[in-house]
Amino acid sequence: MMTDQQVAGVLRAQDSILILTHIRPDGDTIGCAAGLCALLRQMGKTAYVLPNLGATRHLAPYLTPYLAPEQFTPSFLISVDTASLSLIPENGAAYQDKIDLAIDHHPSYEGFANAAYVDSSCAACAELIYYIALACGETISPEIALPLYMAIATDTGCFQYSNTTSKTHFIAGALIDTGIDYRKVNRLHFRTKSRNRMYLEARLISAMSFFDKGSIAISCVTQALLDEIGATEDDAEDLADIPGRIEGVEVAVTIREQEDGASKVSLRTSPAFLNASKVCALFGGGGHVAAAGCTMPYSVEQTKETILDAIRKALYSPEQDTAGRGLCQVVSLS
């Protein structure tokens, strides 16, 4: 695994660089791509980001100055915040076996790139981009800082999640000191919601299912519900955080019906209670200890039964990993 200094050395020697984000893009992958592209251009490099058609209206503007033209032919490919090749968007399929460098913070990173800079102790992948910028000897300009701040803020739930560390706050402070309008970022991503989003949240909460004395909460988002409310993809962004806000919930599951009939599962847990990544890995997914996801080729109801069964088996699993946790610590829910 590479260090930030080694990555800096590689980037100094490259040009004509294309940056790839992941499908269903979140703030971290978008912010990393924009911040890294701004850094590379500041270094005098030709650099672009591959367009991501899944970017929501709040995230897409961060990429606008950096989108690659159709005729651009890269000589060096970088993926950011992407743990698996299965997460590369369809328009990046031709690049899947050509990725030169992966920058990631997921412990489930699958080692697909020729080289990688991965640190799972980072709350957000954007922290790694910050370290790379320092290693390159570059001044962190507001153009670099703004998307990196957004990436860190969104991946930590505005610094509320358990992945937040003292170094996360230090980096955020350093980015703020560049003069960015961080208040606008926080207002846009954490305090502004459409009416349809509020209607959607109300319906999800009223129909939420609870199990095992309220320690497990499951929320289901069907296409029919979205159509009934008139909700867009923007309205349905980051729904996975809602069940876990309820007092007593240790395992929060959000199941989102896909257009092809499959179901996307987002799992949020208290890390000492259940390892979300290991549960999702059973179904070909992955992520972090406290936040992970997977996709199942089942209906919403069948997915609900399947993931609940997997969670319960994991809760009582005697398996232990090097952290003494295995899939989970054995707990009593009787």
Image (cartoon, rainbow, N blue to C red):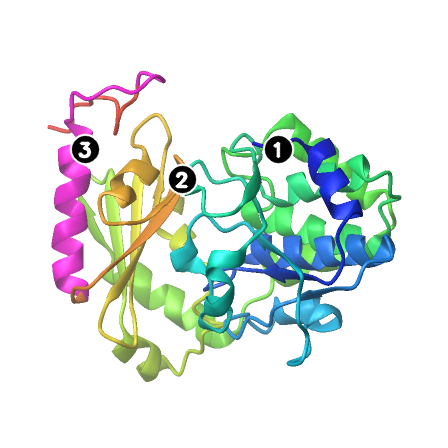
Residue 239 in the image: state x and y as whole percent.
Answer: 41, 59
Magenta region includes residue 76: no
Amino acid on which disc 3 is placed: Ala
Whether residue 249 can be seen here = no
Please tell me which residue lies in front, 37 or 316.
Answer: 37
Q: How crowded is mark 3: few (under 14 residues within 10 Å), some or many (20 or more)?
A: many
- What residue lies at 60% left-to-right and 29% top-to-bottom? 165
Residue where numbered disc 3 is placed: 314
Q: Main secondary structure of the magenta part?
A: helix
| Relative vertical location of residue 306 with respect to residue 115 in this rendering, above or below | below
Q: Earlier in the sequence, mark 1 or mark 2?
A: 1
Q: In which quarter of the image is residue 6?
A: top right
Residue where numbered disc 2 is placed: 108
- What residue lies at 42% left-to-right and 58% top-to-bottom? 87
- What residue lies at 68% left-to-right and 75% top-to-bottom? 72
Horizontal side of residue 294 vs 115, given as left or right: left
SS under mark 1: loop
Magenta region includes residue 302: yes
Residue 148 in the image: state x and y as whole percent.
Answer: 70, 50
Res 2 label: 1
